Every structure is written in C-alpha cells, then in structure tokens.
Amino acid sequence: MAACMVEIFSSFEWMHASAILDQGEKMKRFIWIIVICLAAPVAARSRAPGANPVSAKLRQILDDYSKDLVATAEEMPAEKYSYHPKPEQMTFGKSVDHVAEVNNFVCSKISGAAAPEGAKVSETDKDKLVEELKASMDFCKQAFSKLTDAALGEQVPWFGGRQVTRVSAALEVTNDLIDHYAALAVYLRLNNMVPPTAQPKK
C-alpha cells in the first residue's frame, strides 16, 4: 500500500511536469493507478487461506455426508431396514446403527466429551434409528466445531489404550461416513431407489 501511495504522488507530480500527453490521458493514468492500489489489498485478502483450512475442510466433509446419510436413512422404507444384499453383509438398519455408534465413540475422543448413552435399538426400528443417527451427527458437529489446525497433531485416546492424533480420529469419522454412504447408496439402487446425491437438484 505504501508503494502505491508513492506511485500516486509521483504520478501527480508527473502530471504537472509532463507536456507530452494531453490532460485526459494524464487523468486516465492517474485514475487507473488509484483503482489498482485500492483493489490490490482486497484481492490479496480474497486469496489468503482461512486460519484453519484443514479443520474447515473436515467440517465441510462431515456436513455434506451427514446430510447424505440422514437422507438415505429417511428414504429407505421401514420394511426394507432388514435388507442386505448378501448374508455376510450388514442389514441396512444395522449399518445405520453402526454409523451412529462410531460417530459417538470417535467424536467423544476428538472432543473429550462423554459419548451419549442410549438404549439398544432394533435393526428394524426405522424411526429410532434415524433419530439415533441424527443425534450422533449433531454430537460430531459439536466436536468438529471446536477443531483448530494447531490442535490436529495432538494425541487422543483410542481403541485398545492406544493414542492417535486428533486428525486421525477426525478422518476415521469422515472416512466411515463416505464408506457407508457409498454402500447404502447401492442398497437403495438394488431396491429401485435413487440415492440422495443422484437425485435432481430442487
């Protein structure tokens, strides 16, 4: 900005001293210098990364896939919650329950808050499973809202008494959501339904 001010004053002096260009051309040059000087700081700020770009990206992934998974759980009819393509695969309802359990466990490690306690839900009880899933997503969003890039390298307790970095725990959540959304989207397709992300935008 200081360099721009020097340029403006130099140009102002040049306008008075120069006899080569007409007054209109001199004024155009002066105005353009002012415009550039005013626009440069704005452009620089727009290019500057946020204070916590990695944490912000993790929150974005959580928000996107939590919305997709909840919409998937709501879309599947209650009578199809017992569906699974092969015997060795989890039923749709068990998958929803599993996602909620992972969310509650891992996000409690990320934030240090106690995991929500809830009664065991039947794999075929759609209403309670959707409610459980939504609550677990809200719990994780609270945990992720407090993330900062500076804290991502800190150690948090994990399975088997181990320690992992906070970012590893956060990625466990986001990767699990991505994995299960992909699987449950196939469950929908196999039942002649369209997954939320493949539906026409309203």
Image (cartoon, grey):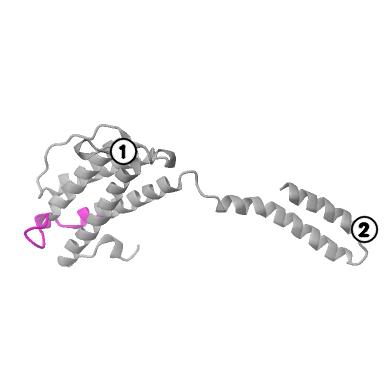
| Viewer can see residue 60 | yes
Could you tell me residue 29's position as x and y percent? 80, 61
Residue of label 1: 110
Q: Magenta segment, principal secondary structure?
A: loop
Q: Find out whether residue 195 is within the magenta segment.
A: no
Helix, strand or loop at disc 2?
helix
Q: Relative to residue 51, is residue 24 drawn left or right?
A: right
Q: As drawn, is 170 to the left or to the right of 28?
A: left
Name the disc covering residue 17, or none.
2
Which amino acid type is marked by label 1?
Ile
Where residue 76 sits: x, y (%)? 17, 57
Badge 2 crowding class, 10 Å Cα cut-off, few under 14, some 14 to 19, many 20 or more, is: few
Nearer-the-camera pick, 193 or 8: 8
Q: Residue furthest front?
A: 162
Question: Where are the magenta residues, as a range?
Answer: 71-90
Q: Work out which residue is located at the far left of the displayed protein and give it.
A: 87
Who's the residue at 91% across and 57% down the image? 16
Q: CA distance from mark 2 to mark 1?
A: 67 Å
Label drawn at residue 174: none
Classed neighbour count for the residue bearing mark 1: other residues with Cα under 10 Å, few (<14), some (14–19), many (≥20):
many
Kindly identify the amino acid type of the residue bearing the numbered disc 2.
Answer: Ala
Q: In the structure shown, which secondary structural element does the residue marked by tag 1 occupy?
A: helix
Residue 132 placement: quadrant: top left
